[in-house]
Image (cartoon, grey):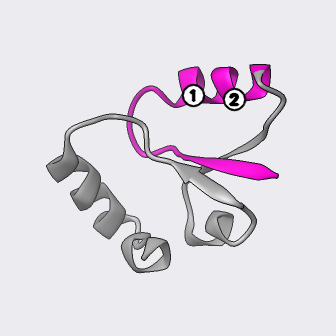
Amino acid sequence: MKIGILGLQGAVAEHVKMLEQCGVETQVIQTKEDINDIDGLVLPGGESTTMFKLLNKFDLLDDLR
C-alpha cells in the first residue's frame, strides 16, 4: 500500500516520517501525475482556504474528487 502526502504546504516531512515508521510506503504529492500511483491520501493540517487555493493553483482539485 502506498499513501500520498499532499506536499503543498507545511508538516509534510513529519507525516512522511510517521507513516514510514509504521512501515507504510509514502509518496509526496505535488503534481496530478503523482495522484495516480497511490492508495490513500493524507492532507496535512493547515488553513483550509490556503489549501483550496493551492489545490486550484496546481490543478489538483478535480483529480482529488
Crowding at mark 2 (Cα within 10 Å: few <14, some 14-19, many 20+): some
Amino acid at pointer 1: His
Q: Amino acid at mark 2?
A: Leu
Residue 60 image point, x, y percent: 44, 70
Q: Is residue 13 magenta?
A: yes
Q: Which residue is mark 1?
A: 15
Task: Report if the CB atoms under discs 1 and 2 are less than 8 Å apart.
Answer: yes
Q: Is residue 5 magenta?
A: yes
- The residues bearing labels 1 and 2 have C-alpha atoms spaced at a distance of 6 Å
Number of marks present in the image shown: 2
Residue 53 as seen in the image, left or right of residue 42? left
Q: Judge whether 8 appears above or below 14 on screen.
A: below
Give percent across and percent down for residue 57: 31, 65
Name the side, left or right, on which 61 lies relative to 53: right
Question: Magenta part of the protein: which range?
Answer: 1-21
Q: Is residue 14 left or right of residue 26?
A: left
Q: Nearer the viewer, residue 44 or 58?
A: 44
